[in-house]
Image: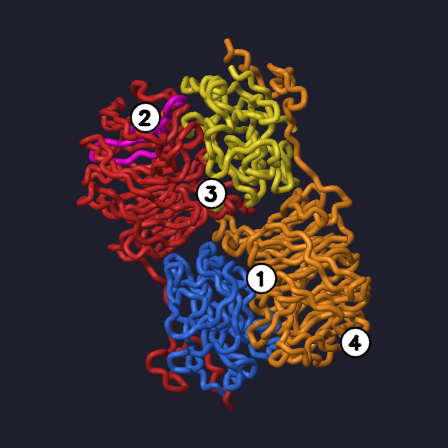
Chain colours: A red, B orange, C yellow, D blue
Amino acid sequence: MRLSHLLLAGASMLMLPCVTQAQELGPEEITVNTLPDDLKRVYLIDLAVNHVVDGRVYILDGEKLDVRGMVELGFLGVFHAPEKSKKLYVATTFYDRLTRGKRTDAIVVHDANTLKIVDEFEIPQKRAMPITYRPLISSSSDEKFLFIQNATPATSIAVVDLTKKTTAELQAAGCYGTYPSITSPKRVSTICGDGTFATYTLNQAGTDGTRVGGDKIFDVDEDALFIHGERDGETYRFISFKGHIFTMSLEGEKPAKVDSFPIADGVEGDWRPGGYQPFAVDAKAGMAYVLMHSKGAEGSHKFPSEEIWSVDLKAKKVTARTKSPPLTSLTISLAGGPMFGINPLEASVVKITADPAAANAVTVGGSVKVGETATQIEASN
Amino acid sequence: MRLSHLLLAGASMLMLPCVTQAQELGPEEITVNTLPDDLKRVYLIDLAVNHVVDGRVYILDGEKLDVRGMVELGFLGVFHAPEKSKKLYVATTFYDRLTRGKRTDAIVVHDANTLKIVDEFEIPQKRAMPITYRPLISSSSDEKFLFIQNATPATSIAVVDLTKKTTAELQAAGCYGTYPSITSPKRVSTICGDGTFATYTLNQAGTDGTRVGGDKIFDVDEDALFIHGERDGETYRFISFKGHIFTMSLEGEKPAKVDSFPIADGVEGDWRPGGYQPFAVDAKAGMAYVLMHSKGAEGSHKFPSEEIWSVDLKAKKVTARTKSPPLTSLTISLAGGPMFGINPLEASVVKITADPAAANAVTVGGSVKVGETATQIEASN
Amino acid sequence: MKVRTFTRLTDMIDRRSETLSRVAAQAIGRRSFITRLGQAMVGGAVIPMLPFDRSGGRAMAAEDVTDAACEYWRYCAIDGYLCSCCGGSLSTCPPGTDVSKVTWVGTCQNPKDNKSYLITYNDCCGRTSCGRCLCNNNLRERPGYRMGVHNDINWCMANDSSTMYHCTVAAIVEVSDGG
Amino acid sequence: MKVRTFTRLTDMIDRRSETLSRVAAQAIGRRSFITRLGQAMVGGAVIPMLPFDRSGGRAMAAEDVTDAACEYWRYCAIDGYLCSCCGGSLSTCPPGTDVSKVTWVGTCQNPKDNKSYLITYNDCCGRTSCGRCLCNNNLRERPGYRMGVHNDINWCMANDSSTMYHCTVAAIVEVSDGG
C-alpha cells in the first residue's frame, strides 16, 4: 500500500532514506537561528504607530542590510542596546487585554544572540510613551543602570538598577532626555526648557541624586535644541533647529558648554537640520553628518533631508554637501564605519558612506525596505 | 500681564468669553460619539496580519462609505454581529505580555451603539485562530448561542451560551464551518472533508447535541466547496471551486441537498469563483453575485475577481457578466440593498449595485481605502 | 465631557510640575508661541511634511480643505490620526474611546477669518490606533523639555482606565489675541 | 529541533482527531494531492496571486528565484511571511522564536530536478508577526475540513508557551514518488 508506508511515527520519518533519489535535497531538520557575536548590527526601532500596541526592533546585518531578527517593542516601548553588554533592553507597557485591563510596565531583557527573553521585571508606571528617540533610554557608563525618561506628563528620570531590579527616580520637571556621563557611571544629564542642561550625580547606591543646573545656553523659542545627542570623545554634540552645533561637557558636577558654531548661517536657501535623529558624529574622523532641508522655518524641524552636510568639527566648517534621499534619522556606530539612515517615505533603511578623499562627501549605498514608521536607528560597533 | 490672564483654573477657562470676537468659533466641548440605531452598517473584518496581535473591525456607514468606528479583533479574533441583537461579539485570545505569558480566550461583548465593552467572559482555549471567514462564528436563530469553530488542530464546535456564559463542545473531527439552522434555534450544521454536511441538534440546555451526517454531495479533491455560505430563505447556498452552486436545507435533523447547478461549465476561459467570500446572495431578488476569475485551475481558488457574474437562482443561469475590480470578498445584507466588496490589492471597500433593469448587471460605485488585510465583510439590514 | 487642557509653562522647571500636571487647563506657555503669532506666518511659508505619509509634504491649505485632510488649518501642530477619519470629528472622539485627560496645544490661523486660535489636541484613548489619516505638522512644536507643546508622545498617558492611543481631535480653546 | 508534521487524513472524520492531532508526523492525505501530482502541473499553468501583495500576482518561477521571493518553488502552498526575510531560512526559524508543533503540508515541484517534494510549512512562533515577504500560494490547498492542507489558520495554534505567529518555513519532508 502506498499509503501505509507513510504511516510512520513521529520524527523517525525524517531519518528514513528518501523514497526516490534526491541526494541533494533530503529531509530537513528545522532549527532556530541565533546571531553571531561578530555581527555588525543595525537596530531599526519602529513604533509601528498604525498598530501602536505592536512596535518592534528589526535587527539588520549592517554589511548585507538584510533582516536577521526582531525584538518586540510592544506599546510605545523604548529600546537600548548597551555598548558592551550581551543584553538588549526594552522598557514597555503591557495590558492583559491588549489595550486595556491590568497594566504592567516592565523592563524586558533579551539575550543579544538568541534574542530569547531572559528576564523581565516591573518598573513604575511613569515612563514616557514616546515616538522613540535615543536619549529616552540609556545606560550608565558601567552599564549597571538604565536611565529612562518618565513623563506623566510631569517629567523625571527613572534610574533602573539592573542588578537589584529596582527603580529610583530623579525629579526633572521641565527637562527631557538622558545623557549619561561618558566617564562617570553615577552621572547623567538632561536638557531643560529654560535653555539649560542639568546634571545629576547619583549616590553610591544609585537611589538618589544631587542636581546641578548649568548656565542658559540656548533659547527654546528662538532656536531650540534637538534632544538627539551624539557622543564625541568625552563630550556630547547637540544641534539646534537653526543648525548650531553645541559641544557639551557632561562629565563634571555641573554641565558646561565647550563651544558652539553655526553650520548654515548666511548660507542661501534657509537650510536647517530636520528629523528625529538629525545628525550623526564620526568621532574618529572628527566629522558630523547633518540631515538638512532647504526653506527651513518655524515648524520644519522634522522635515526629511534634501542634502547631507559633512561638517569638520575641528575646523568648524562644512566640507561637503551631498544630495540625499529624504531621511529623518541618521546613525553611525561609535567605532565609525558606514552610516545608516531612515527614509520614512519609502519605509527603508539606507546605507551611507563618507569619502575622506572627497572632503567626506557622502555616497548613498544600498537600501532595504523594512519597518513602517521607524524614527530611531542605531549601529553597533 | 498678558500671561497672567490665562492662569485660570481648570475647565472654567472654557466658560469665559473669548478675548477677541469669534462668534462662530468659540470654545468647544469634546465629547464621545455614539452610533445611531438606523445606521446601515458595513463591518470590515481585518486581521491585520502584519501586526497579527492587533486585528480590528472597522464599522462603516454603508451609504456614505465613511468609517464610523472600530472594534478590536485582537490576535486572530473572530467577529459576529447578530441580526437583531444590539450587541457585537468578538471571540479572541489575549496574552498578558502581548504575545506571551498568561493566555486568556474570551468573548468580548460590545454595545452596538456606544461600542463600549459591556461584558467579557472566558471560553476554552480551543478556538480556531483563522483568517476570518463568516462561518467560523455565528449565532443560533434565537441569538442565545454563539457557534464558534474550534481547531487545536482537531476540530469541534464551541456552543457558547450567552446567558449563562458557559461553553459546550460538539465534536466535529474533519469538519469545518458553522451554519445555524434558520428556523430551529437548537440546530447547527458543518461541512466535512468526506464531502458531506453534518447537522447537530442540541439538547434543551444547549450542553450537548446529536449529530446526523448527510450524504456525500461533493468531492474535496475534484471540486471542493468554499466554506462561505449564504442564507437564502430557509436554505443555504454554497459554491464550489469550479463554480457549482449548491442549495442545502440545514433545517432538519439530517442535512439535505436541495439542488445544484453549474454557472461556468462549458464557458470559454476556465472561469472560476475565487476569494475568501466569493459570492453573495440577494435573497429578495433571487440573485447570486459571484467573484469570478479566468484561467482558473488547481490553486486559483483565492484569486481576486476579474468579473462579477450575476446568477438568477431560480432560472439557474448567468444573466450578466461585468468587469470588476480585483475583489476577494463580497457581501450584501439580508434585506438586500447595495453590495460591498474587499479589494485587497488597494486595501479598499468597494460599493456595488445591481441593476434589475439590465439583467442585474452590476455597477461599481464608490470606494474607500480602509484596513490592510481584510478577508471578511458584512452588511447590516 | 469637558475639555481639560494640560500645558506646561516655560518656567515650569520650578519643580511644581507634579502639582501642575494634575491641574486641568493650565496656562499656556504664551511667550513660547502665542506671542510670536503676530510676526510668524501660520500656514504661510512653512510647508509641513508628513513623515509617514508616503505622498510627501503638502502646504497647510486654505478654506476648501476638509477636516479629514492634514492641511486643514486646525492641524498646524498635530501628530496623529485625525479622529475625523475614525468615527469622530474635530471635537468628538470615536465611539468607545475616552477623551485624554491631558493634551498639548497649538496656535493655528483660520484662513476664513485670519484669526489665530488656541487649539487643544486631545487624544482619544482606550482603543488601538485608528490607522487612518496620520498627520504630522509641527508649527511651534518643541521637544519634550517643553512638554505642553510637544507632540511626539502619547497624550493618553495620564488616563486611568487605558493609556492606549486611538486618534487625535483638534478643538478650539479660544481665539488667540495674537499678542 | 525536530520537525513534527501534523496532517490530516481525508478519512479523519472517524473522530480520531483528538488523538491524531497530538501525534507528530502523521501520514499525509495522499489521495488528496500527492496522487494527483502526476497529472496536475505543479508550478505550471497556475498563476498564484498574492492577495495582500499590492504588486498583484506572479507565476511560480524557475531556478533563478531566491528563497526570499514568493515564486520560489517550495512556496507553492504557503500562506504567511517567509522566514527567509525575517532572520530565518527555508528550514530555520528566526532567533527567539519556536518551531510550530503542528503544520500543514504541500507538494511542490522543484524546477531543478523536476521532482516533487513533500513540503512541511512550519510556522515559527512566539513573537509578533514579522511583516516581511507575505506570500500566499494555494496549490492543492483546501478549506479547514481538510485541515492538514489548510493554510488560512495559525499553525502555531498548538504551541504551549505562545501561539503567536511570526513567519513560515518551507522544509522538505521527502521526495514524493508522484504516485
Picture quadrant where residue B26 is located: top right
On whether disc 1 and disc 4 are found on a single subunit, the reply is yes
Question: Picture coordinates of residue D160 (x, y %)?
Answer: 48, 61
Question: Magenta segment, which residues?
Answer: A220-245
Q: Amino acid at mark 1?
A: Pro
* Label 1 to label 4: alpha-carbon separation: 30 Å
Kindly tell me whether residue B193 is visible in this rendering: no
Image vertical order of residue A94 relative to residue A191, above or below = below
Tell whether position B153 is magenta.
Answer: no
The residue mark sitting in front, 3 or 4, is: 3
Q: Are marks 3 and 4 in contact (CB under 8 Å)?
A: no
Q: Which chain contains the residue that carries disc 3?
A: C
Which circle marks residue D140 in the picture? none
Disc 1 marks which residue?
B130
Q: Secondary structure at mark 4?
A: strand
Disc 4 marks which residue?
B258
The residue mark sitting in front, 1 or 2, is: 1
Q: Which chain contains the residue that carries disc 4?
A: B
Disc 2 marks which residue?
A209
Q: Is residue B11 left or right of residue A2?
A: right
Disc 3 marks which residue?
C56
Q: Are marks 3 and 2 in contact (CB under 8 Å)?
A: no
Crowding at mark 3 (Cα within 10 Å: few <14, some 14-19, many 20+): some
The residue mark sitting in front, 2 or 4, is: 4
Q: Amino acid at mark 3?
A: Gly
Taking the spot 72% from the left edge, 48% from the top edge, the residue there is: B63
* Label 1 to label 2: alpha-carbon separation: 52 Å
